[in-house]
Image: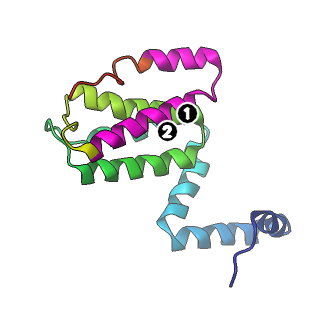
Amino acid sequence: MKAASIHELKKALANLDRDELLDACVRLAKYKVDNKELLTYLLMHADDEQGYADAVCDEIDQQLPTAHTVHKKTMRKIVRWMDKYIRYSGNKETELRIRIHFCRQFVERKIRFRSCKVSANMYATQLKKIEKAMEKLHPDLQFDFRYQMQGLDTYPS
């Protein structure tokens, strides 16, 4: 069976009454954890982006090792997790707060990863994603985020 387009789904959802729509949402949440997490964001966190970004940053703090090295598998896992929660938000400011916090933790914890080319490339990719997201913001916000980024691009090995 081929999945319907978003436009077709939107039309079908518009025709449902409140109880049928509620049942559809609950069934969606039952079958996949990602759907449940997205629904949780939409219903409980979408109105407080700052709080949501802070919660994600706190989780990053807990997931990062306290040692001065990080394994590439651990870094991949954290980046995948972080990307998923950034995607739920869709807000560029939230994305920048989370990505800058992630990179800032490497500097503050003095985590060495440059000897591993894969980890160094993942860090560089985060910096590129920060720059790309920053281009879409107002110049005043760009200035604020660039100030927060000082010292991240020249991270010593």
Quarter of the picture holding the N terminus: bottom right
Label 1 neighbour load within 10 Å: few <14, some 14-19, many 20+: few
Residue 79 on image: x %, y %: 38, 47
The Cα–Cα distance between marks 1 and 2, rounded to whole angstroms, is 22 Å
* Image point (58%, 34%), residue name: 92
Which secondary structure type mostly characterizes the magenta part of the structure?
Answer: helix
Residue 103 on image: x %, y %: 35, 32
Q: Nearer the viewer, residue 70 or 64?
A: 70
Q: Nearer the viewer, residue 27 or 127?
A: 127
Label 2 neighbour load within 10 Å: few <14, some 14-19, many 20+: many
Q: Say which quarter of the image contains residue 14.
A: bottom right
User: Which region is colored magenta?
Assistant: 118-147
Q: Residue furthest left?
A: 67
Q: Which residue is mark 2?
A: 52
Q: Nearer the viewer, residue 119 or 99?
A: 119
* Image point (41%, 39%), residue name: 125
Q: Is residue 114 visible?
A: yes
Disc 1 + disc 2, Cβ < 8 Å: no
Q: Earlier in the sequence, mark 1 or mark 2?
A: 2
Q: Is residue 50 visible?
A: no
Task: In the rendered view, tell whether residue 77 sits above or below residue 14.
Answer: above
Circle 2 — which element?
helix
Circle 1 — which element?
helix
Q: Which amino acid, mark 2?
A: Tyr
Q: Which residue is mark 1?
A: 132
* Disc number for residue 94: none
Q: Which amino acid, mark 1?
A: Lys
Quarter of the picture holding the C terminus: top left
Residue 133 on image: x %, y %: 56, 33
